Amino acid sequence: MKYNKLILILIFAFSAAFTQAQSNVFDKLSERKDIQAVHVNKSLLEMLPKMETGGVDIAGLVNKLDQLDIYTSEANEAIKYMNSLFDFFDKDKAYENFMSLKEKDQKVVFYGKQDNGTFKDLVMIVSELNKCTIIRMRGSFTAKDIQNIMKK
């Protein structure tokens, strides 16, 4: 019985640390002076009539989004740091790499975090030679919702 409690405590401790690490990645992006960060909450998202981000029309997701975060930079050191997040998300078991595209000097990768078939967190990293952009969408949406915006 003591061992079961110990195992449960360890699981919760590691889960909390793991969640904290994910939050810290985005906090670090916001704190860097060489990265421009835009955070849009649900109230403002609902006021926007139509929004297209990186060729992806997210208007169909607006009522399902809780927050939209956009990080971008053209500074070399920031681009290196932002590109290192490809490895972070590839190793992070909570995120699934569900689409990658590489064309010339551009690399685009979509990562998603699911909970019982519903996406709670989507991260798109667009890396170009002299610029990197990370778009994070938090909310509650299905794979069908994502497919619909990708078709547009």
Image (cartoon, helix red, strand yellow):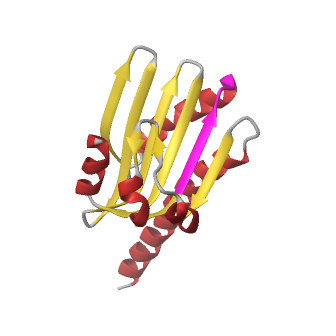
Residue at 61% across / 36% down in the picture?
72
As for residue 69 lying within the magenta part, the answer is yes
Q: Quadrant of residue 100?
A: top left
Of all residues, the one furthest to the top in this rendering is 104
Question: Where's residue 53, x and y in %?
Answer: 47, 42
Q: Decide which of 91, 39 is in the foreground and name it.
A: 39
With 139 as the anchor, is 74 left or right in this view?
A: right
Q: Quadrant of residue 118?
A: bottom left
Of all residues, the one furthest to the front in this rendering is 49
With 40 as the anchor, is 91 left or right in this view?
A: left
Residue at 52% across / 58% down in the picture?
48
Q: Decide which of 76, 57 is in the foreground and name it.
A: 57
Question: Where's residue 47, x and y in %?
Answer: 54, 63
How many discs mark residues in the rendered view?
Answer: 0
**Which stretch did the figure color magenta?**
68-76
Quadrant showing the N terminus: bottom left
Question: Where's residue 101, x and y in %?
Answer: 34, 27
Quadrant showing the C terminus: top left
Q: Is residue 17 something that shows in the picture?
A: no
Q: Decide which of 59, 87 is in the foreground and name it.
A: 59
Of all residues, the one furthest to the right in this rendering is 33
With 31 as the anchor, is 151 left or right in this view?
A: left
Question: Where's residue 73, x and y in %?
Answer: 64, 32
Residue at 43% across / 60% down in the picture?
62
83 up-or-down from 38: above or below:
above
With 75 as the anchor, is 55 left or right in this view?
A: left
126 up-or-down from 65: above or below:
above
Q: Main secondary structure of the magenta part?
A: strand
